[in-house]
Amino acid sequence: MASKEVRDLFVNYLKEHAHRITNERFLILDAAMDADGHFDADELYFKMKNDYLKVSRATVYKTLELMSECGLLTKHNFKGDRTRFETKYGRNVHYHIICMSCNKILEFEAPNVEELQDKVCKENNLKSIDHTLQVFATCNEKDKCENYKEHVAENGGN
């Protein structure tokens, strides 16, 4: 369940931008903030449906977008994959390495990236407003690759 602070932040954002405040949106807020790792809208929708929570798919999509806009979630597009979300609120800045063989996502922190970004912006009289770093890679040993066998089976050997 989302904390009172998170709920208040979301309610204030909805009010400021003239969006409806509904129980359905609170159910989605709770489910998204409790989600582990990276998820897409359909995964969250089906999880909620399996948990017997009645929400519409369209409202899940719209609410996740609103949560991203107000800074509760980060929205990612990992090279051709569906849009994925992860909780942003209360987390350290981090980056991603995505295995193109099995879709495994590794997260890492690197403060030196932010320092370099700030230095380059300052040198060019710019102010950074956002950034992302995604590294696309493949596992060195595909037979030990975490999800490679399932990936091959799902994609017909591709």
Image (tube, grey):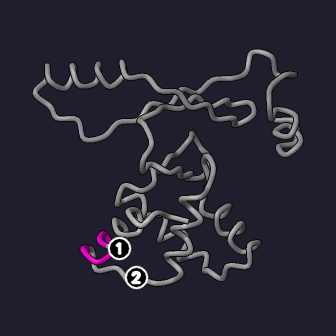
At numbered mark 2, what does the secondary structure look like: helix, strand or loop? Answer: loop
Prevailing secondary structure class for the magenta stretch in the rendered image: helix
Q: Is residue 33 above or below residue 57?
A: above
Assess disc 2: are there few (<14), some (14-19) or many (≥20) residues with their C-alpha within 10 Å of its C-alpha.
few
For the magenta stretch, what is the residue range? 12-16
Magenta-span inclusion, residue 150: no
- Provide the residue designation for mark 1: 11
Quarter of the image for residue 122 reads top left
Residue shown at 29%/71% (left/top)? 12
Type of the residue with mark 1: Val
Report, in whole angstroms, how far the alpha carbon at label 1 lies from the one at label 2: 7 Å
Q: Position of residue 140 (x, y in %)?
A: 74, 15
9 versus 152 height, above or below:
below
Q: Residue at label 2?
A: 21
Q: Quadrant of residue 146?
A: top right
Q: Which mark is residue 41?
A: none
Label 1 crowding class (10 Å Cα cut-off): few <14, some 14-19, many 20+? some
What amino acid type is highlighted by mark number 2?
A: Ile
Picture residue at 51% right of the left edge, 68% below the top: 29
User: Left or right: where does residue 6 sit relative to residue 40?
Assistant: left
Q: Pick whichever of labels 1 and 2 is earlier in the sequence.
A: 1
Give the quarter of the figure containing the C terminus.
Answer: top right
- Residue 39 placement (x, y as % from top left): 62, 53
